[in-house]
Amino acid sequence: MSETFTSVSQEEAGFRERTRLTFDLDADICVIGAGLAGLSVALEAARLGASVAVLEGRHIGWNASGNQLGTVMPGFALSLADLIERVGLEDARELWTLSKQGAEFVRANATEENMPGIGLREGALEVSNVDDGDRLISRLQMLHEDFDTEVEGWQVDRVRAVLKTDRYFHGIHYPRAFQVDGRKYVHGLAALARRAGASIFEDTPVVSIDHSGIRKRIVTPSARLRASHIVLAGNIHLGAPLRRLSETLLPVWRYAGITAPLGERVHEITAFKGSVMDSGGIDHFRIVDGDRLMWENPQTTWAARPQRFAGAVRRRIRTIFPQLGNVEITDMFGGATGQTVHGMPQIGQLRKGLWVASGFGRKGMNTSAMAGQLIARSILRGDERWRLFSPFELVWAGGMTGRVAGQLVGLWGRASSAAAGSLARYRERARVKDGKREARLAEANRAAGTGPRRPPPGVRPRPAPPPRAAAQAAEPAPQEDSVSQ
């Protein structure tokens, strides 16, 4: 079934159907935030038999959770090499396994039966914008042998056979990765949580929290709620009651656009039907609605109207695929993700009965699902695997200074990646040019009859002797004196 992406205004057309909390309530678990993480906690906990109330200050999936490309694959924002250096190989393997389980949680729920029109499509391709085959081989070996992940290494020719651009070199194909309609998934997750017994209240901001005592108290504008456990899943939007926690996250807004229908020409320039992302973290795109491109590119540490970046998306598409020309962008969307200083999610228990699930960065689909499972199963079944995230403590993100620094670092990283890509393409063109020149010279020598003779097939050519050895070989050998017997 094909995907159909609706605009944010159409998603908000269900405003009249929202339910506010207008009466006092008791629950086993109170989840603050109705994004991917909060709804995953609610769904898993309700399935395990707990009474769950979700409080959302605006509406379901209003921020990044409902405004992303929907790519689901294992891993974290932190690179594997850095993860191993931080916690060691064994714990890194355990964390990676948890991330794969998070991806499978999404797959199990994102069925057409559960979420009509979800449009699940297999495969993700990570392409390199520099020519570094040795690093590719090393990473493939690590993923396959040490982390039991199904991957394929694609050489340059194969990448360029499916993506008609000279911007990309080698690639890593994840056949078990997949993508879904991100907006439909977050609303489908809410529907599944309600069906399992969870109560979700929108337009219900939290005014204050008292997390002391066995029963925690949460105050909203029109009601009070008591719960044995509180899960903070509001990302950077937890607000005044938990501002110190929000300030451990650097807000990063990412923006994406959807083109007008492009017809057959889009299939001529990209024959890969899954998600494509580059190793420099610059571009992330895929085909939707049959012949449209959905493309994520700009990012800032400041909030702005998504429509402001339509030109940037259009120019980026033209840079990568100039044969498409100046495409029309018909829809723009974006949202803020929370990035931690160390690059890993914040998952765990802050104090008895007070939990946090945030800081998922660019891998939010699998890591938010993983967090939901870990927290719900710890509360209700005593599963302690969330402690694997203990080395990644809460670190202040630097406030306003951190935002400025983050923006500058992001710009520098993107510029460095672009420069490295330009240098790689220059070297490739130089190699091709040198190869053609050598071929013409060899052809001219053969035509003039002065070129070296080729040995017969299967015979290795004899190396030329050094100059001194050749001169000695040309001298006559001295005659030995005869000896009479």
Image: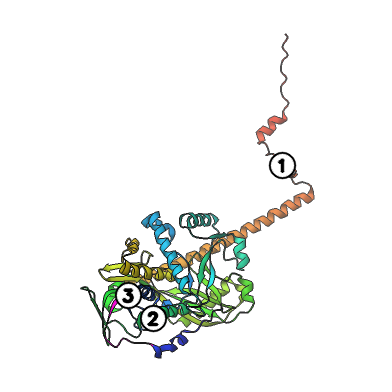
In which quadrant of the rendered view does residue 431 lie?
bottom right
Q: Secondary structure at mark 2?
A: helix
As measured in the structure, the alpha-carbon distance from the residue carrying label 3 to the one carrying label 2 is 12 Å
Which residue is painted at 48% across and 71% down in the image? 107
Q: Is residue 317 above or below residue 58?
A: above
Which residue bears the numbered disc 2? 194
Q: Is residue 329 above or below residue 453?
A: below
Q: Which residues are the magenta region? A: 18-29
> Type of residue at label 1?
Val
Which residue bears the numbered disc 3? 50
As measured in the structure, the alpha-carbon distance from the residue carrying label 2 to the one carrying label 1 is 75 Å
How crowded pointer 2 is (Cα within 10 Å; few <14, some 14-19, many 20+) is rated as some
Q: Indicate whether residue 23 is drawn in magenta.
A: yes
Which residue bears the numbered disc 1? 459
Q: Secondary structure at mark 3?
A: loop
Q: Residue 376, position in %: x, y?
A: 34, 70
Q: Earlier in the sequence, mark 3 or mark 1?
A: 3
Q: Earlier in the sequence, mark 2 or mark 1?
A: 2
**Disc 3 versus disc 1: nearer the observer:** 3
